[in-house]
Image (cartoon, rainbow, N blue to C red):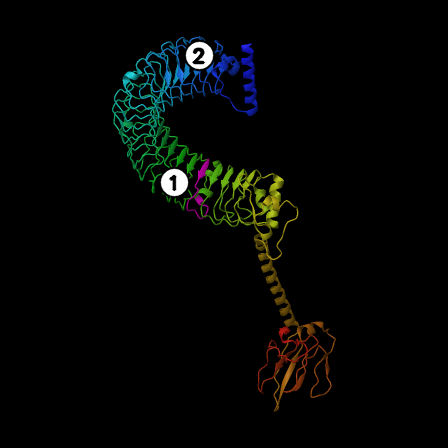
């Protein structure tokens, strides 16, 4: 009856747990492995998963034949005697992320097949000397994130291959700590409080391949501190406080391939590099205070592939500094204070593929690239470069990527736009964050392989239709962050493989030109960027509206009060040509009319108060007359008018009193020549017309509406 009540109460609590979606802390008498642990088969064997159950004790009914037992993320605080003695087949035991403070010396008795034990993220202060006596096949022991002050005494674990004691409180290590660990290959003592390494600190560890001493407080490494590590390949000393390394500190490390000294306090290249480093391939000196590099700084590092000098205080880099590094593939000199590099600084680097000079103070690159025949990537961003010679990259026959962002370029330099070798191999070019104001049709030569072109955050306000005519393989184009107002759809016709053009952050004028461009983009499935959608800047009715919404309709919005830039470019030559043509036509008509009807005027002596004038018909009236139509002149002295035929003189003399007003022809124009005093010369037929009186009928009566008919 008691068992039934117990089972009933358990199922009630289990139901509440399911409904509330919270794990309940059940009394120990209700806990059993059968009820709360998941058991399943894996490729390695039976797995008993009891992790994350808020257990305070190891469950009593976990199957004995577990191959893997996971008790991580619980609240177990102590491991009692013979807790796991019944798990004879157990090979992996996970006790990490508990609150374990103490372990009984015989807690792991009987685990003769155990190979992995994880005690990370607990509160252990020490490991009793005979704790792992029966685990003679143990290969991995993880004690990271505890409070250990001395390394554990585990010399009898002669099959142990990996020991992790990082994130503890170790203050020193002695050679006796590692006695008997003849199979150890990986030793991690990072993130402790080690201050000094003495000679033979790692005596007996002849097979260690990786030693991690990073994130300690080391300031001194004595000579022969690593002399016993004859098979060491990777040594991590980064994030310490090293100011000096003794000359023979790395003696006999002939097999080491990787050395990390990042984020220390070194002021110069250690002399210890000149002894016994013939196999080194990766050297990291980032984040130190090195000021100068000399020609002998990397002596005897003939197999070095990667050299990282990022984030130092380099000001002087001597010529031929890297001459003795014939196998170097990557050189990182970014985040320094380099202003000038000698032309021969990179001589000997025939295998270099990546050169990083970002964030220095370079103003000119000169001819430093000429010896780099196999260079593939060059990073020159965040300098003060304003000029790149035309032959800068001509020797770089395999160049793939050039980044020269955030410099002082005001135009596309010839050394990039017309590089002979780059035109065939270059795939990525970034000129973003430069004050480039203009790109012409000749700014870029032929880039047959270019796929990515970044022109973000420059000062471009217009792009000609033929700006990118010689980039047939371009896939992405960045034009964001400029001052562009419109683009011509014909520009995309030269980019058949374009998949994305980034347009956000411009001053787009959402009228017909841009509408046609956007519609053409949409028809080809070209993306406008994924980070931010481009928006209209004008006209005011569409300000702030995305181009996608503004151009959702088929009809374009045209501002009748203004012409677009494209229209102005087209209309100006048409208007100028029309004006010139009209001028030529008028000139031809005038010349032809002058030859057919020569016009002369003769002065007639005046008699007292009268003056002679000869009337000139207007051009319109001359053109309207036929050869046989008579010409009627104003009457003379009140007499009737006299008719003359056009084949004779078309002028008739008349005496004009000063008070007599000249008659106008029916078109409101009147040409007259006032006759001077006797003896005057012939008057010009192109004399100024007789001014009309203000009360003439052809004038507007209202003074505000008057206009000069001439």
Residue depicted at x 51% and y 21%? 24
Number of numbered discs = 2
**Left or right, residue 571 beside residue 650:** left
The correct choice, above or below, for 704 with respect to 534 in the image is below
Residue 474 appears in the picture as rendered: no
> Whole-percent x and y of residue 432?
46, 43
Q: Using the image as rendered, state which of residue 220 and residue 31 is in the foreground.
A: 31
- Of the two numbered discs 1 and 2 on the same chain, state the one appearing first in sequence: 2
Q: Which residue is mark 2?
A: 91
How many angstroms separate mark 1 from mark 2 (CA)?
52 Å
Marks 1 and 2: CB-CB under 8 Å? no
* Image quadrant occupied by the C terminus: bottom right
> Whole-percent x and y of residue 240?
32, 29
- Whether 1 is among the magenta residues is no
Q: Which mark lies nearer to you, 1 or 2?
A: 2
Residue depicted at x 39% and y 9%? 109
- Report crowding for label 2: few under 14, some 14 to 19, many 20 or more residues within 10 A (C-alpha): many
Secondary structure category for the residue under label 1: loop
Q: Which residue is mark 1?
A: 359
Prevailing SS of the magenta stretch: loop
Magenta-colored span: 400-414
Secondary structure category for the residue under label 2: loop
């Amino acid at each position: 009856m008691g068992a039934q009540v117990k089972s009933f109460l358990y199922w009630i609590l289990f139901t509440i747990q399911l409904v509330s979606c919270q794990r309940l802390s059940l009394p120990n008498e209700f806990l059993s492995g059968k009820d709360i642990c998941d058991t399943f088969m894996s490729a390695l064997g039976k797995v008993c998963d009891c992790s994350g159950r808020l257990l305070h004790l190891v469950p009593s009914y976990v199957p004995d034949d577990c191959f893997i037992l996971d008790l991580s993320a619980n609240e177990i605080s102590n491991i009692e005697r013979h807790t796991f003695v019944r798990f004879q087949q157990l090979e992996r035991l996970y006790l990490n992320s508990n609150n374990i403070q103490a372990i009984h010396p015989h807690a792991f008795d009987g685990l003769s097949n155990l190979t992995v034990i994880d005690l990370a993220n607990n509160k252990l202060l020490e490991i009793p000397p005979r704790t792992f006596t029966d685990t003679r096949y143990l290969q991995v022991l993880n004690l990271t994130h505890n409070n250990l002050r001395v390394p554990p005494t585990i010399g009898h674990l002669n099959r142990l291959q990996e020991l992790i004691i990082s994130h503890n409180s170790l203050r020193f290590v002695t050679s006796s700590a590692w006695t008997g660990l003849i199979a150890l290959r990986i030793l991690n003592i990072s993130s402790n409080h080690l201050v000094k390494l003495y000679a033979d600190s790692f005596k007996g560890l002849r097979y260690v391949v990786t030693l991690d001493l990073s994130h300690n407080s080391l300031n001194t490494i004595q000579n022969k501190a690593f002399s016993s590590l004859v098979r060491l390949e990777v040594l991590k000393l980064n994030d310490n406080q090293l100011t000096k390394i003794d000359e023979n500190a790395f003696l006999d490390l002939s097999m080491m391939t990787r050395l990390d000294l990042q984020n220390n306090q070194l002021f110069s290249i250690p002399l210890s590099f000149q002894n016994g480093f013939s196999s080194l391939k990766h050297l990291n000196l980032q984040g130190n205070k090195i000021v100068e590099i000399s020609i002998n700084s990397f002596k005897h590092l003939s197999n070095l592939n990667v050299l990282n000098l990022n984030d130092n205080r380099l000001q002087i880099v001597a010529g031929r500094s890297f001459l003795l590094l014939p196998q170097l593939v990557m050189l990182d000199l970014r985040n320094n204070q380099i202003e000038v590099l000698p032309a021969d600084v990179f001589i000997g680097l025939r295998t270099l593929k990546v050169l990083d000079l970002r964030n220095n103070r370079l103003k000119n690159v000169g001819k430093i690239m000429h010896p780099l025949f196999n260079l593939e990537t060059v990073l020159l961003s965040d300098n003060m470069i304003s000029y790149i010679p035309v032959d800068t990259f001509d020797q770089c026959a395999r160049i793939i990527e050039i980044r020269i962002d955030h410099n002082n370029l005001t135009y596309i330099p010839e050394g990039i736009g017309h590089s002979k070798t780059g035109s065939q191999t270059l795939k990525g070019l970034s000129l973003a964050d430069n004050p480039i104001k203009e790109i012409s049709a000749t700014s870029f030569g032929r880039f047959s392989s270019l796929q990515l072109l970044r022109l973000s955050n420059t000062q471009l306000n217009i792009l000609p239709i033929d700006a990118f005519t010689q980039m047939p393989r371009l896939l992405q184009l960045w034009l964001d962050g400029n001052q562009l107002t419109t683009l011509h759809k014909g520009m995309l016709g030269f980019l058949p493989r374009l998949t994305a053009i980034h347009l956000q952050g411009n001053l787009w004028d959402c009228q017909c030109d841009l509408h046609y461009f956007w519609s053409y983009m949409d028809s080809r499935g070209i993306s406008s960027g994924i980070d931010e959608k481009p928006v209209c800047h004008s006209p005011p009715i569409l300000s702030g509206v995305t181009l996608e919404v503004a151009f959702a309709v088929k009809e374009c919005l045209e501002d009748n009060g203004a012409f677009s830039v494209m229209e102005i470019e087209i209309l100006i030559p048409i208007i100028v040509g029309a004006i010139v043509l009209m001028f030529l036509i008028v000139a031809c008509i005038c010349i032809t009319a002058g030859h057919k009807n020569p016009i002369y005027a003769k002065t007639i002596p005046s008699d007292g108060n009268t003056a002679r004038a000869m009337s000139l018909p207007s051009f319109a009236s001359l053109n309207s007359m036929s050869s046989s139509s008579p010409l009627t002149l104003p009457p003379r002295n009140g007499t009737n008018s006299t008719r003359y035929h056009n084949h004779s003189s078309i002028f008739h003399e008349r005496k004009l009193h000063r008070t007599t007003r000249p008659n106008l022809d029916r078109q409101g124009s009147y040409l007259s020549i006032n006759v001077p005093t006797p003896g005057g010369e012939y008057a010009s037929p192109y004399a100024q017309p007789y001014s009309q009186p203000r009360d003439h009928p052809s004038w507007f009566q209202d003074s505000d509406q008057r206009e000069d008919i001439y």
